[in-house]
Image (cartoon, rainbow, N blue to C red):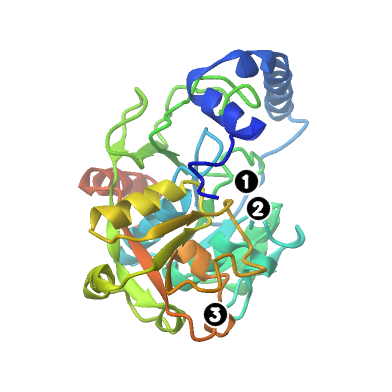
Amino acid sequence: MSPSLRRPTLADRLQAQWLTGGALSAALLPLSWLYRALLALRQLAYRTGLTHVQTLPVPVVVVGNWIVGGAGKTPTTLALLELLRARGLRAGVVSRGYGRDGDGVRLVTRVSTAREVGDEPLLIHLRGLVPVAVGRDRVAAARALLAAEPGLQLLVSDDGLQHWRLPRQLSVLVFDERGLGNGRLLPAGPLRQPPVPLLPDHLVVYNAPQASTTLPGFVAERRLAGAVTLADWWAGKPASMDTLLALRALPGLLAVAGVARPQRFFDMLHGLGLRLGGLALPDHADFATLPWPADTAGVVLTEKDAVKLPPGRVGALPVWVVALDFSPGSGFEAALDQQLQKLSLPA
């Protein structure tokens, strides 16, 4: 059944009310107040010294958000890594590895699977060409990564804004079109934490056509960078816009997306003139079974999905991977340089 024809579930209704408010959201307000109280207790534990922020020998940059769901942290992380590389800095990445089997610390390698380390950390390792460690305990993951890669000059945490044990010298907050939603905390709203005034070590990136909150920040530019066959993607070959545009002439293609906002991916493909069906999957879909019909003529995937599909699994079916070109803009670069100078890192 088409996603647009599927009967809305309770979760669908709640997520819609996370943007606008409504009776269901209002009914959950007591749980939001409890969540706020628990957050306040955690903050009190840190302020009184019952719990401590840990220390690490290199600076940490956290890429995160206040709102639950995919706001664009991983594209922002990849763009940040490219900016750091251009400045001659050697960075590593730590992440929880959402959706993987187990919570322990693990180093990501080219032969790791998404089930072992998570789809986004594996994508960051393959696409960003940087060392990555995953673990529920980000501090333990950071220490393991630094022990394995002693030449690292700084660490980037993909998510972890609310992992307060992890020290951070710079926080990059990412927002999409949802902004702050209805302004309520979980579960009555989408906020992971109450909004707070920006600190000098905060930078805001809007993964949206325009700013979606009143916070000063930088509007990112995003566009499709091209396509490459699944086999060539795994071989490390770059995407080509010519390859992507050539798909306009092929009938019967199906776009498949197991990401937080699949319609955004479909709309971008349609905007380039590709006329293809869309199959929206749950975020972090594991592709344990191939989700498309057996008679599908060809499949177009996101990179986040490609990391879960080694070429041998799709047989003779033509599959292309579409890459995203994401840039936080020149204003962000200038602000980042100022922050790096404060950390005594070259910019």
Q: What secondary structure is found at the residue carrying circle 3? A: loop
Using the numbered discs, state the Cα–Cα distance from disc 1 to disc 3 in whole angstroms: 40 Å
Helix, strand, or loop for circle 1?
Answer: loop
Residue 75: percent from left, percent from top: 41, 54
Disc 3/disc 2 C-alpha distance (Å): 34 Å
Tell me what residue is drawn at x 66 percent, y 53 percent.
Answer: 139
Q: Is residue 129 visible?
A: no
- From the image, which quarter does the C terminus lie in? bottom left
Residue at the location (53% across, 17% down)? Answer: 21
Q: Image point 54% across, 60% down: which residue? A: 120
Q: Earlier in the sequence, mark 1 or mark 3?
A: 1
Residue position for label 3: 314
Query: What's under tag 1, amino acid-wise?
Result: Leu
Q: Amino acid at mark 2?
A: Arg
- Kind of residue at badge 3: Val
Q: Which residue is mark 2?
A: 138
Front one among 299 and 179: 299
- State left or right for residue 119 relative to residue 101: left
Residue 111 sits above or below residue 199 on the image: below
Q: How many residues crowd mark 1 within 10 Å: few (<14), some (14–19), many (20+)?
A: many
Asked whether, in this view, residue 97 is left or right of residue 254, the answer is: right
**Residue placed under numbered mark 1 in the picture:** 166
User: Which image quadrant for residue 43?
Assistant: top right
User: Contact (CB < 8 A) between labels 1 and 2?
Assistant: yes
Of marks 3 and 2, the one in the foreground: 3
Q: Give the mark nearest the N terminus, 1 or 2.
A: 2
Residue 50 quadrant: top right
Q: Residues within 10 Å of mark 2 (few under 14, many from 20)?
A: many
Q: Earlier in the sequence, mark 3 or mark 2?
A: 2
Q: Report whether residue 268 is seen.
A: yes
Task: Say few, some or many: other residues with alpha carbon within 10 Å of mark 3 (under 14 / 14 to 19 / 20 or more).
Answer: few
Residue 51 at x, y = what percent? 75, 35
